[in-house]
């Protein structure tokens, strides 16, 4: 992975990945903008470093763990609330990737080898597959004031 992938893919994706459950659960994005940016830069760096230096099946677990611990530490949420936010983030990520990956690979008639071998194509596909659909979902959630109320025991 190239160094500019951090700025163009990892950090923005980390920001959007956390902004989506914030919008879904009614947590203010505007009030938490600075911590969100700090989180995105930090989690983006962790994801970038793991992508560069770790090529095992343990990497998704470490990404999940770092995401949860950073949400817990930066936002001072309870650990259970940070865990619920992280779980919802990764479930939504998997749903978006399943829906869009299969359709984009078929529609554009490109192989996964092509995507992983070309850093610019990888950034573009990440933008199309994850970031834009999630941004659209965030916009719809905020526009129509759709949110899921977290149980009271998570708001401590």
Image (cartoon, helix red, strand yellow):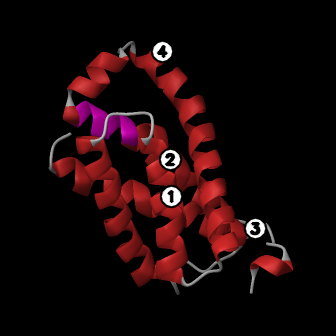
Which numbered disc, 3 or 2, marks the residue that appears first in the sequence?
2
Residue 22 picture quarter: bottom right
* Spatial CA span between label 3 and label 2: 28 Å
Residue at the (38%, 62%) spot, across then down? 43
Q: Are marks 3 and 1 in contact (CB under 8 Å)?
A: no
Q: Is residue 53 left or right of residue 83?
A: left
Residue 123 among those drawn in magenta: yes
Q: Which of the two marks, 1 or 4, is nearer to us in this view?
A: 1
* Spatial CA span between label 4 and label 2: 29 Å
Q: Are marks 3 and 2 in contact (CB under 8 Å)?
A: no
Which numbered disc, 1 or 4, marks the residue that appears first in the sequence?
1
Residue 144 image position (x, y, % from top left): 72, 66
Residue at numbered disc 1: 65
Residue at numbered disc 3: 147
Residue 5 among those drawn in magenta: no
Which numbered disc, 3 or 1, marks the residue that appears first in the sequence?
1
Residue at numbered disc 2: 61
* Spatial CA span between label 2 and label 1: 6 Å
Looking at this rendering, what residue extends furthest in the right direction? 152
Pointer 1: residues within 10 angstroms few (<14), some, or many (20+)? Answer: some
Q: Which of the two marks, 3 or 1, is nearer to us in this view?
A: 1
Q: Is residue 45 left or right of residue 107?
A: left
Please state the extent of the stretch shown in magenta in the rendering.
Answer: 120-126
Pointer 4: residues within 10 angstroms few (<14), some, or many (20+)? Answer: few
Predominant secondary structure, magenta span: helix
Residue at the (51%, 53%) spot, across then down? 64
Which numbered disc, 3 or 4, marks the residue that appears first in the sequence?
4
Residue at numbered disc 4: 106
Residue 13 picture quarter: bottom left
Q: Are marks 2 and 1 in contact (CB under 8 Å)?
A: yes
Residue 102 image position (x, y, % from top left): 53, 22
């Amino acid at each position: 992975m190239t160094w500019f992938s951090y700025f163009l893919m990892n950090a923005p994706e980390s920001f959007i990945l956390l902004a989506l459950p914030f919008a879904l659960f009614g947590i203010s994005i505007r009030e938490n903008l600075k911590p969100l940016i700090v989180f995105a830069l930090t989690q983006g760096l962790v994801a970038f470093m793991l992508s560069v230096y770790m090529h095992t099946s343990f990497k998704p677990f470490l990404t999940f763990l770092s995401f949860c611990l950073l949400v817990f530490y930066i936002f001072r949420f309870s650990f259970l609330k940070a865990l619920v936010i992280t779980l919802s983030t990764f479930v939504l990520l998997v749903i978006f990737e399943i829906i869009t990956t299969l359709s984009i690979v078929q529609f554009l008639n490109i192989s996964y080898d092509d995507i992983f071998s070309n850093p610019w194509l990888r950034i573009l596909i990440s933008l199309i597959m994850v970031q834009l659909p999630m941004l659209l979902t965030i916009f719809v959630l905020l526009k129509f004031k759709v949110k899921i109320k977290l149980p009271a025991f998570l708001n401590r």
